[in-house]
Image (tube, rainbow, N blue to C red):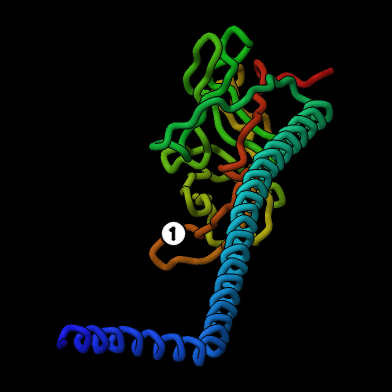
Amino acid sequence: MAFPKLRAVSLRTVIVPVVIALALLWIFARPLTAVSLFIYKISGAFLHTSYQNVQASREQAVDLIAARERAAQLELENKTLQVINTAVEAAALKTRDYQAALDFKTDFSYKTIFAQVIGRSPDSWHKQIILNKGSDDGVILGRGVLTERGIIGQVTKLALHSAIVQLIFNPDWRMGVKLARLGQYGVLNGNYPGPASLQFITVDSQVQVGDEVVTSGVCIDTDNCPYPENFPVGKVVEVRRDPNQVDLVVKVEFYEDLSGIREVFVLDHKAEVIS
């Protein structure tokens, strides 16, 4: 008789929780759907915004890479243009040099041999240059060398197709000159990198700043005179009296610039005048 009673209690225990669960599910069904929808919308908007941000970042990265590539291309083009411009300027300068040399050769009244500078030693930059013409080209040892601006030196060593020229900028080199306006003679001594010194100018001389200095034309051997008379050399840039010296201190600036020597003229044998 106790068995049926135990069975009835067991069924109530099972049915009541199920009914309560169904009721709760029915009660919270709509709010849970709203919450789920809200969460869905928020997460969808977040994912959409994140995607847009990633897409924008990707586009910015692509644009940045393209801009850098363009900048590199422009830099390369700029460097190429600079090289071309330098080459054009060098060609123009060479053309001007050749034109100046041609004009000088045409107007010059002495026979000369045109030559180019092909070498300079770093330890004797201001002392000598090497030319691309030698004895087989008619160059003679001891001949004077000049540009269209003025005297620059003298041939001191000679080979078949090259020659070494001692420059007047060399402190160890001296040459006889004169003041063109006064006809007064002196000895010019190089003093690179400063102006040359004109020696043996007496204190009573009327030499002035701006006076032209030219070759003297005085030679021991008249058959081998390096420079004819009155070739331009430079101009006086300083005159002063030094109480410790007997003569005036006279400084001369050469007409030719040491760094600008590229093409030169070697005076021909005996510096003969063209008839």
Q: State whether residue 15 is above or below residue 121.
A: below
Badge 1: few (under 14), some or many (20 or more) residues near its Cα, within 10 Å? few
Q: State whether residue 274 is above or below residue 253.
A: above
- The residue drawn where x is 52% and y is 25% is 130
Secondary structure at badge 1 equals: loop
Q: Which quarter shows the N terminus?
A: bottom left
Residue furthest to the front in view is: 1
Camera-side residue of 91 and 232: 91
Residue furthest to the left in view is: 2
The spot of residue 119 in percent (x, y) is 51, 27
Q: Hey, which quadrant is residue 10 in on the image? A: bottom left
Camera-side residue of 38 and 223: 38
- The residue drawn where x is 65% and y is 30% is 263
The spot of residue 182 in percent (x, y) is 68, 51
Q: Is residue 206 visible?
A: no
Q: Is residue 81 visible?
A: yes
